[in-house]
Structure formats: C-alpha cells, structure tokens
Image (cartoon, helix red, strand yellow):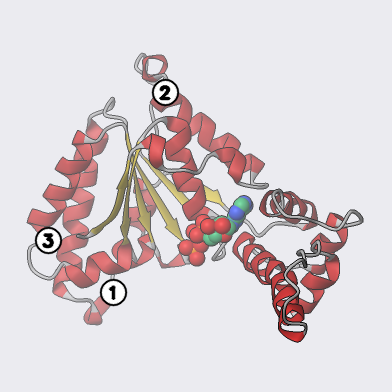
Amino acid sequence: NFISAVVPPGEIGVKFDDIGALENVKKALNELVILPMRRPELFSHGNLLRPCKGILLFGPPGTGKTLLAKALATEAGANFLSITGSTLTSKWFGDAEKLTKALFSFASKLAPVIIFVDEVDSLLGARGGAFEHEATRRMRNEFMAAWDGLRSKENQRILILGATNRPFDLDDAVIRRLPRRIYVDLPDAENRMKILRIFLAQENLDPDFQFDKLANLTDGYSGSDLKNLCIAAAYRPVQELLEKEKENTGDTTSVLRPLNLDDFVQSKA
Ligand code: ATP
C-alpha cells in the first residue's frame, strides 16, 4: 500500500487536451516520452537517441504537475503508477530493501509504465544530516540502486517522473538521475484564459461573459486556484435559486440563471 494508484492508460481519464496552456511542456513531453514509448524502434539504434529515464517536473503548487503526469500516461499508452514521497518514507521503516525491490519488479511487469513520484523531495531529498532517520537513508539508497538497474536496460519503457514544489531540496544524486527538468509555471493572463475556457466549457454562461476580464482579475492564480474559483462561482446561482424557492414556497418553476462575471468577483472576495 505504498503505491497510491495503478491505472491502465485507457482508464486514466485525462488527456493533453484537458490541460489548458502549458503548450511548451506538452511539446517537450511529447518528444521525450510519448514518441519513444509509442515508437521504441525509432530510438533503439545508434547512441544519440536514447529514451529518457527520468524527468523532473517542478514549479509552484497547483500548476498541473500531477495532471500532466496522468495525461502523459494516457498519451503515451502507458500504465500509470503513482507513489507519494512523504507516505513512502513514513511507512517504510524497516524493510526498505524488500519493498524497493518489490516496487521495481512490479513496475517492470507493467511496462510501458510511468512511475510518478509526487513530492520527490521528501522521498529523495537532500541528505538530512544528523536528524535523518536511518530507515529513510536506507530507503533512498535502495531506491537509487534499483533505479540505476532500470536505466541499464534501455528498452524497458519505464520512466520515472518526479514532481516537486521544492527543487532546491533535491540533492545532486537525484538531480543527476532526473536529467530532464521541466518548469511548470503559473499561467499568465492569456494562459489563464485558456484554462478558464476548459473549466467553463459546459457551463451556462452569460452571453456577454468576458473571459479576458476574468483572466485579468486572477493574477497570480494557479490552475488549481482557478478551478476552485469556478466551483465557488458556479454555486452562486444555485444558492440564489434555493433562497428564492424558500421565500415563495410552491414556486418550483424557477430555473438557474446563467453565470456572470460578478459571480466570480463576489467569490473572490
Ligand atoms: P501540487 O504541486 O500541489 O501537487 P500540482 O502541480 O500537482 O500541485 P495538480 O494536482 O495537477 O497540481 O492540479 C490540481 C488541479 O488543478 C487539477 O486537478 C486540475 O483540476 C487543476 N489544474 C491545474 N492546472 C491546470 C491546467 N493547466 N489545466 C487544467 N486544469 C488544471
């Protein structure tokens, strides 16, 4: 139970089109992962083109790193196996060696597979000095050794995808094993607009709804913040309708009014 999820590619339910913005990130992942997983024969000759074995996604919380990892597995036709750094280190007291071997042997049976390590800093962070628990240290060393074993088998189609909000907490040994590092940034106004269009695609919006205005009102918001704002705003017409019904009991013909910009402004406050 140190694995939080194993999902086959057809059941992940997220694809690149569900992710707004982050075009450069998707493009990089396409070249680094999707193509080699889908067409391994193109990468098996010569020395220059080798499938990448480790990628780090880093950036502020809520910018879509987990979502990208899942969508990537869908797009690459790979199984998605996810583990969380902090649960691993807290649960793995004792049998680090056995558990790491079990994890990697399980993963290799699932190939093609993307092993997503969320909070990779807490699993494989900088060496913790005097306060580091012995079990954590052993676990990390085992993990690295198993990981190196993976890298030597070129065609196994196993990728480790780490994610972190704290890239500076990673030590050199991990950085070296995650040779490709991709920054997942907060969206600018134009990209916030793209993300908002995805979240609001199915909503009943006021005909004059101005996406650019909403995008300008949400400076500094992550994708996750935008989603929470949309949920809060969408709730307002529902709440209004319920209140109206309470006032004049018996009136059940009322319909939900469309969402307008003010719902967002009020929800922000
Ligand atoms: P953390 O670093 O806190 O783990 P994260 O970067 O992994 O965060 P996610 O968990 O992927 O962020 O994002 C949280 C939610 O925010 C997603 O489930 C999704 O609903 C929404 N989201 C974030 N970014 C985007 C985006 N670019 N397009 C669509 N939805 C997004």
Q: Residue at x 79, y 57 (%)?
A: 189
Residue in the foreground of this view, choosing between 166 and 224: 224
Q: Which residue is mark 3?
A: 96
For the residues labelled 3 and 2, say whether their Cβ atoms are less than 8 Å apart: no
Please, what is the three-letter code of the amino acid marked with disc 2? Arg
For ligand 1, which image quadrant applies?
bottom right
Q: Residue at horizontal 75%, vertical 57%?
A: 188
Q: CA distance from mark 3 to mark 2?
A: 33 Å
Mark 3 vs mark 2: give the one in front.
Answer: 2
Q: Is residue 27 visible?
A: yes
Q: Position of residue 36 (x, y in %)?
A: 42, 25
**Which secondary structure, mark 2?**
helix
Q: Are marks 3 and 1 in contact (CB under 8 Å)?
A: no
In front: label 2 or label 1:
2
- The circle on residue 38 is 2
- Of the numbered discs 3 and 1, the one sitting upstream in the chain is 3
Secondary structure beneath disc 1?
loop
Q: Give, as a three-letter code, the residue at label 1.
A: Gly
Identify residue for label 1: 128
Mark 3: C-beta under 8 Å from nearest atom of ligand 1: no
Observer able to see residue 63: no
Instruction: State the image coordinates of residue 202 (x, y, percent, origin top left).
Output: 69, 49
**Residue at the image position 15 percent from the left and 53 percent from the top:** 100
Mark 2–mark 1 Cα distance, whole angstroms, equals 39 Å
Identify the residue shown where x is 59% and y is 63%: 224
Disc 3 marks a residue whose amino acid type is Ala
Q: Position of residue 166 (x, y in %)?
A: 47, 66
Drawn side of residue 94 relative to residue 9, left or right:
left
Question: Contact (CB < 8 A) between labels 2 and 1?
Answer: no
